[in-house]
Image (tube, rainbow, N blue to C red):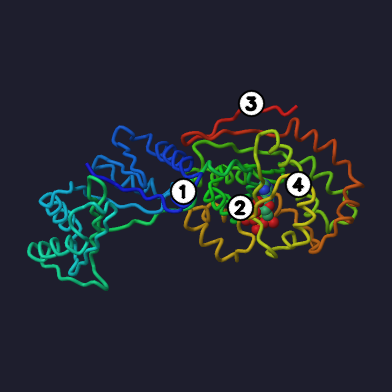
Amino acid sequence: MKRVLVRYGELTLKGGNRQQFITKLIQNIKFRLKPYQEKTTLIRDHNSLIIEVADDFLERLISDLQTVFGIYSLSVIEKSTWDLKDLQAQVLKIVETNLHQAQTFKLEVKRIDKTYPLTSTEIKQFLAPLVLQTTTLKVDVHHPDLKVEVVVKKDQIDIFCSRIKALKGLPVGVSGKGLSLLSGGIDSPVASFLTMKRGMQVDFIHFMTPPHTSPEALDKVFKLASQIAKYNYQSFNLYVVDFAKMLQELNHIPDQSYKINIMRRMFVRIANKLAVSEGHQALITGESLGQVASQTIESITTVNLVSDLPILRPVIMNDKEDIIKIAKRINTYEISILPFDDVCSMFVPTNPVTKPRVWLAEKQEASLMWEPILDYIMASEIQKFHYHEGEFSQVVFNQA
Ligand code: ATP
Ligand code: MG
């Protein structure tokens, strides 16, 4: 059996919400460990969590915990009582298991419980000679190959050799629920991931325009949502909207340079209506300021005006390069660059307006019959898919 110490990090700072955050985090952790829950035991400490796990599941446990937002870092620990003989034995044990090629070491001692009879220095003075005698290690306080940390708590002592970085952020579910506009591109999955990082549960909406967009393009969207599922809430929904009828209508826009801008306004109108009925508190997009014509501040303004809900844009100030870096880290990049285009990439007019004006956008729309089409789409062109434990299943969904 191994013990893993889970540190909460930022959570500890959140005052009044703290208990709620920790409860949510532990729920999320339990959900991740469900497939092998009989191999694990969770022990709550007031500032951290210890998970006992069967030896064969240690590696899996650590990689699973590294997908859970709200965890700051992890350590595989040995536990000792306050008894010095026991402490000595556990320290030597952990040094031995982590020795590998190490030539130098350093001891770090922290007393959380100040009633312990020895001071930190005295504990070091007791332990260091033991390590020097039983191994070939030498002391190096500046750049040790092996750092042994000893933390004295009430009734017990934790000993560990490394702090494994985790995702940080906040537990998904503590910041409400958002609806992310997921295209097949690089940016929107990253924006969704970053939203989850701040504790928001994310559902997805995708606009397709068959027959212009292929089944493969739609498949990409399911793949992307699945790929980031492990960071998301326990289960979530993906809504697929058939936008074809509206796109047809957009061909009648007098000034075609406004087409993408109006399309965006229609996306957002539909997403708003859906969000209100499904309980989402915000929309999320992968827009980045100035990246393309439709992402200038003027475009953003004309789009925001048709949204009652706040539109969160987590990558708004990121360069493409930085977005790609995250996309690679979360393994969405390879899916996003598959060559199946979504509606946006296919219908870019030759000269999209870069600085749309609100009144001109409104004027374009006034010459369309968009309202009944929007109602029709809301009533009968939305499919809902529910993701749970690795699979999507279609849910009966009728907005009418
Ligand atoms: P991405 O890489 O996320 O596709 P992009 O740089 O290609 O972004 P656009 O195509 O201009 O940018 O889209 C901007 C944002 O609008 C996307 O990040 C996404 O949130 C939303 N969006 C675009 N097309 C669709 C679509 N077909 N379905 C749902 N949302 C979309
Ligand atoms: Mg795109």
Mark toward the start of the polypeptide (3 vs 1): 1
Check disc 2: other Cα within 10 Å, few if <14, some if 14-19, many if 20+. Answer: many
Mark toward the start of the polypeptide (1 vs 4): 1
> Which residue in the protein does label 2 denote?
188
The reply to whether residue 342 is in sight is no
Give the Cα separation between the discs numbered 3 and 2: 26 Å
Tags 3 and 1 in contact by the CB under 8 Å rule?
no
- Secondary structure of the residue carrying numbered label 1: loop
Give the Cα separation between the discs numbered 4 and 2: 18 Å
| Whether the residue under disc 2 has CB within 8 Å of ligand 1 | yes
Q: Amino acid at mark 3?
A: Val
Relative to the observer, which residue lies in front, 108 or 104? 108
Horizontal and vertical percent for residue 285?
Answer: 65, 51
Tags 3 and 2 in contact by the CB under 8 Å rule?
no
Give the Cα separation between the discs numbered 2 and 1: 19 Å
Task: Identify which residue is drawn at 49% across, 37% down.
Answer: 234
Horizontal and vertical percent for residue 362?
Answer: 88, 51
- Secondary structure of the residue carrying numbered label 4: loop
Task: Identify which residue is drawn at 27% across, 58% down.
Answer: 110
Give the Cα separation between the discs numbered 3 and 1: 31 Å
Check disc 1: other Cα within 10 Å, few if <14, some if 14-19, many if 20+. Answer: many
The reply to whether residue 124 is in sight is yes
> Which residue in the protein does label 1 denote?
69
Screen quadrant of the C terminus: top right
Left or right: 154 with respect to 134?
right
Mark toward the start of the polypeptide (3 vs 2): 2
Mark toward the start of the polypeptide (3 vs 4): 4
Left or right: 389 with respect to 395?
left
> Which residue in the protein does label 3 denote?
396
Where residue 32 sits, quadrant-wise, is top left
Q: Amino acid at mark 4?
A: Ser
> Which residue in the protein does label 4 denote?
307
